[in-house]
Amino acid sequence: MKYHLPGDIASLLANAVAAHRKGNLKLAVTCYEQIIGAEPDHVVATQMLGTLALQTHQYDRARILLTRARELDAADGVTYHNIARLDEVEGNLQSAVANYTRAFELMPENADTSFSLANVLASLGQMQESERWYRQTLSINPAFASAHRQLARLLDHSTVDGDVQAMEELFNRERTSDSSKLQLAFGLGKAYEDLREFDQAFEYYSVANGLKRAQLRFDINHWDLEIEKLKSTFTPELFTQFDGVGNKEARPIFILGMPRSGTSLVEQILASHSNVFGGGELQTLNLAIMGAMDVSRFPTNMAEQPVQAFAKMADDYLLKTQELSGGSPYVTDKKPDNFRVIGLIRLMFPDAIVIHTCRNPMDNCLSLYKNHFSDNGPFYSYNQAELGQYYRGYTRLMKHWHAVLPGFVFDVQYESLVSNQEAETRALLDHCGLAFETACLEFHRTSRSVRTASAIQVRK
């Protein structure tokens, strides 16, 4: 095959990188592939194409390309960093620690790498090591606002200590960007909440949320429209139409509900059982659905689906979760907003175990308002009115699922679980068909990753 390169490799690489940065990923891929076609051992093009594959969720391709880039240059810290990112996505956190550590050895002044390593260590429950690496990050870059926020979340503040003072000084600097200020404000809100200075804490939380909301393009009214479409689509008639489709043998465990409602706690309890693998917040269900139907028209195209589509979704889902589980009979999928597709779960897995965590609405919404989440959302949590509107829509939808699928969803009340742990745990295990094990009462000792805003709480 001949490659018609516009000028030399260097100019083509410059075009590829420029397109990548501007978000023109199709052009970037074409340019990177042309470079590799002309020069198969071009390490930068190989690494960047692997990074782009990671960015677009092509994880198998990303693994091949990044591994090849490492073979071509074993001293490139950026490649190790990106392999560690891929390890995180695939849930292999021990490997992520090793690769971030190697990346930092090769790039000892890279604050992004030390920060990422600290986050993974926190997910693994290694809190002292996590603190050490957050402080390492701040020693490299004292203005690294996200590290300040994460450190504030990790620690319990009893005084206005040096950490709090450093956040306030940075927050009040004129040249500090709004993006950094919102991170610092979340951290300061947490610190002053620890100090029981609640008015000041809430003032910081309000500033943080306002700054975050200003960055987002989001219309809460689309949520109300989605709720009505789901309710009008997933009717008793639809379930009759597709009665008996899907996989009638498998019993995957879905833990869902509002974020900050206790989903991580319930999963940690179940994952402490010898027969359960805790999968965490998996994208597997979404990917299985997207592989079998046109999701751009969901849910209004449900009645048009061929009956074999639901078995395909179920098979694709099971294949991926079984790869993760290491042979465990049960796998938990703790993605809170799967509550939106409970009807589809029922069609895929008629005997699925669906656990819905419930929490006092004010406590649930306040806990959301106090936290900064990833760039993927939830977007509704940064404005009190929008948060309330979303919560009301969620309650309407859950009432609908209970009405059209009686007995399919098992409610777990967070407050009851916390106050009467053994009785509620026994009831939970019984519903899942699992024998009681005392390890489930000592969930905070279980060695597994928790990769959500609740990572610190479930260790206590």
Image (cartoon, grey):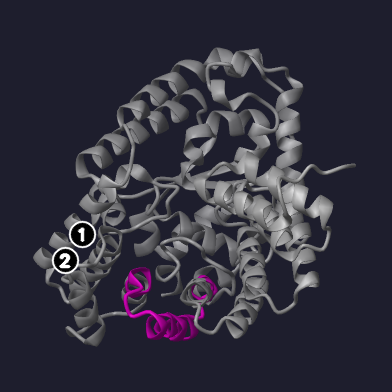
Position of 424 relative to 339 (above/below): below
Q: Is residue 431 visible?
A: no
Q: Please report the bounds of the magenta region as a residue range.
A: 120-148
Residue depicted at x 50% and y 77%: 110
- Report x, y in % for residue 158: 21, 84
Element at badge 2? helix
* Badge 2 density bin: few <14, some 14–19, many ≥20, Cα 10 Å: many
User: Would you say the residues marked 2 and 1 are in contact, meaning their CB atoms lie under 8 Å apart?
Assistant: yes
Residue depicted at x 49% and y 23%: 404
- Report x, y in % for residue 447: 59, 75
Residue depicted at x 13% and y 60%: 203
Q: Quadrant of residue 201?
A: bottom left
What label does residue 387 carry, if any? none
* Residue 160 forms part of the magenta stretch: no
Element at badge 1? helix
Q: Is residue 43 left or right of residue 372?
A: right
* Residue 125 forms part of the magenta stretch: yes
Residue behind mark 1: 205
